[in-house]
Amino acid sequence: MRWLILLVGLFLVGWFLTGVTQIRPGERAVVRRFGKVVAQPGPGLRIGWPWGIETVDRVAVDEVRRVSVGYQPEGEDSSGATPIGQLLTGDHNLVNAGVQVHYAVQPDRIDDFVVQQDRVNGLVARSAEAALAEWVAGRKVDEVLLTGKSVLPEWLAEQTQQRIDAYRLGVRIQAVSVALLLPPDEVRSAFDEVTRAQTAIETQKNGAREQADRIRREAEAKRFSEEQKTAGYVKERLTLAQTEANAFENRLAQYQRLKKQNPDILASIWWDEMSKVFERLNKNGRIDLLDSHLGPDGLDITMFGPQPRKK
């Protein structure tokens, strides 16, 4: 009888100890009492009702989970979902496309994850597969192979999240990485040749753009230099013209003052200037008598000065 009581006591102690749960850092717990969620405690030691009355599910909310989707040469992926294999593009070509979907539990919807956790991997994989097939089918094979690794991840993450929201899985898609995006092995060499040719074309285009930019920069530099020279020449000529104009105005003002003092001053100045001109012409042999028979001394143009103006 004593042994029976001892066994029952040990059983009750062990049963009550099932209500003690240690929640580790980075985890959140969902406490269900008779199937109803009553608490979501954080890290620490929790003492509650024993097993059978309460069930405590610990979930690592900091853990990023991964699901492989698409072409898997080895067979099935880690989620147990059958891979979709090769995908058909919009121009009826086949490509081997494989991606990895990374997701984490949403702390504010951890109860949804606990309820659906057995279905999460499969639903995420199926949703990503459908979105991946849609993206590939809507594009030509060249676009898929050339832009897939840069464009597909962001688009696929957004589309997968939209598709799984209706299932209330309590998870958030963190990122999508493209693990494989290649043409089938049978035609890979041909696609590689096309890729090399396209790369060579892009290289030549880039070289042509660089050369055009260089020529344009040189032309701009030459234009700037010519504009600077022209501006300098214009400034120089304007300064010279202004200086000459100022000198002429000063001389004119001086002549006008002298004319008031001596009305014949302009004739004197004219004769002074003309004598200098005639002297240079005579030295160069460019001045001669008009007619040596008009008089004993001949006739030259210096005999006639400027006539006074009639008033």
Image (cartoon, rainbow, N blue to C red):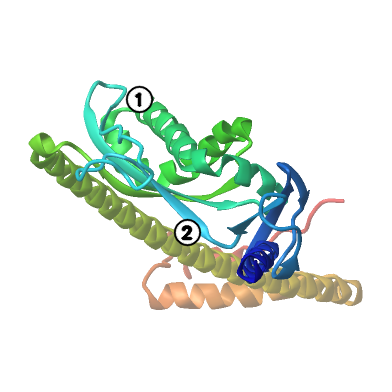
Q: Nearer the viewer, residue 177 or 37?
A: 37
At a point 78% along the width and 70% down the height, the residue shown is 249
- Along the horizontal axis of the image, is 278 left or right of 58? left
Type of the residue with mark 2: Leu
Q: Nearer the viewer, residue 20 or 172?
A: 20
Q: Which mark is residue 294?
A: 2
The relative height of residue 137 versus residue 186 in the rendered view (above or below) is above
The picture places residue 90, in percent across and down from the top left corner, at: 31, 22
Give the quarter of the image for residue 289.
bottom left
Q: Is residue 50 visible?
A: yes
At a point 72% along the width and 75% down the height, the residue shown is 247
- Along the horizontal axis of the image, is 172 left or right of 144? right
The relative height of residue 107 versus residue 139 in the rendered view (above or below) is below
Type of the residue with mark 1: Ala
Q: CA gap, disc 1 to disc 2?
A: 114 Å
Mark 1 Cα within 10 Å, few/some/many (few <14, many 20+)?
some
Mark 2 Cα within 10 Å, few/some/many (few <14, many 20+)?
few
The picture places residue 60, in percent across and down from the top left corner, at: 58, 60
Tell me the residue that label 1 is attached to. 137
Q: Secondary structure at mark 1?
A: helix
Give the quarter of the image for residue 285.
bottom left
The picture places residue 104, in percent across and down from the top left corner, at: 56, 53
Q: Is residue 302 visible?
A: no
Q: Nearer the viewer, residue 245 or 209?
A: 209
How many marks do you count on the picture?
2
Q: Nearer the viewer, residue 147 or 223?
A: 147
